[in-house]
Amino acid sequence: MPKLWNETIEEHRRAVRDAVLETTATLVGEHGLRVVTMSKIAEESGIGRATLYKYFPDVESIMTAWHERQIAGHLHELAELRNGPGAPGVRLERVLEAYALIQQRRHGHGAELGALLHRGERVAGAERHLRHFLRDLLAEGVRAGEIRDDVSPDELAGYCLHALGAAGGLPSKAAVRRLVAVTVAGLRPQA
Amino acid sequence: MPKLWNETIEEHRRAVRDAVLETTATLVGEHGLRVVTMSKIAEESGIGRATLYKYFPDVESIMTAWHERQIAGHLHELAELRNGPGAPGVRLERVLEAYALIQQRRHGHGAELGALLHRGERVAGAERHLRHFLRDLLAEGVRAGEIRDDVSPDELAGYCLHALGAAGGLPSKAAVRRLVAVTVAGLRPQA
């Protein structure tokens, strides 16, 4: 019985937290970081201000939590594509396209938010994780003869992540796909 | 006669200014931005403190002037390579390698300096200039059949600049050249 009770509490807490994150991200997206207040977030989330402060000390900490949840979601999405069906080269292309589309969407959030959220050890950790992840998939591609073997998978991973950063400035999904095609062409075994 | 006199004054001013820029860049490179003072700069440049303040109000403004001079020098270097001999594809490769080596050296100056210097409209202007410059060279390459024509030269220029940003994390010139080779492979006409 106590366990069930605890689970219910836990579930409730997670639901409140998720509602706060979603509400805040929406408000910041609409109005900008500077004008969104804790009172406004409490009001729009439908919880009391005092309750909100039990969860988060300020707007910045809510946005950091939201961003961390986004990053975890993205890494999960990329891992699913890596673990999906197909030859390494095909899975790599799916992962790179998904990553480039994430970069493009992220750019839409604006420079203000980007500057705030891109400090922080958590983001650096996610970037390292992603680089290792790509490196392993590239190494698989090298063994399958689908990826060039004259440059190390680690250097190729760095190339991919930087090249696909260009997606941030692109206006359409079609342009992102062309960027992925160009980037992947650089990875192929050379005649 | 007055003209000659003015020219001498102008030459003298430029020499002092250049000495201050060089001295400051060296001091900051050796000791870091935070510990370099105007007094130290005056002392090492061999000019009086009062004279130094006639040229620059603070260390940050000296470093900004130094950086602007660096950028102008880099753009000049890249323009010379573009205007040199050879087919567009060959000149493009020279330009891209020089750009990547600049990115690698720049990274060596450390994050502190990078964060200070990479704000500012002057840098954004230089980046736009470089992108237009590359776009024109890529368009020349397309006309010569050396560069793929299924993606616009402007998008290809964005890809190049981002991909070569990876040079900042590379440990050797050999690694930079491999990065350039991979990036250029992405630009070639596709079978």
Image (spheres, coloured by chain):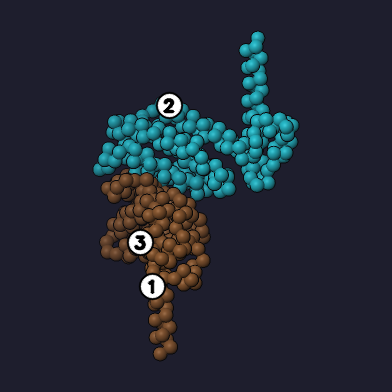
Chain colours: A cyan, B brown
Q: Which sits in the foreground, B72 or A90?
A: B72
Nearest the camera: B124 or A64? A64
Q: For mark 2, what is the residue?
A: A84
Q: Residue at x 72, y 39 (%)?
A: A40
Describe residue A26's horizontal placement relative to residue B172 as left or right.
right
Residue at 45%, 45% (x, y): give it. Answer: A165
- Chain bearing tag 1 is B
Q: Position of residue B22 (x, y in %)?
A: 38, 64
Count neighbours of disc 3 (C-alpha within 10 A) and say few if under 14, some if 14 to 19, many if 20 or more: many
Looking at the image, residue A85 lies above or below residue A44: above
| Chain of the residue under label 2 | A
User: Left or right of A159: which side holds A71?
Assistant: right
Residue B181 is situated, as x and y percent measured from the top left of the image, at 30, 48
What is the C-alpha distance between the residues marked 2 and 1?
A: 64 Å
Give amino acid for label 3: Leu
* x 34%, y 40%: residue: A156
Quadrant of image for the N terminus of chain B:
bottom left
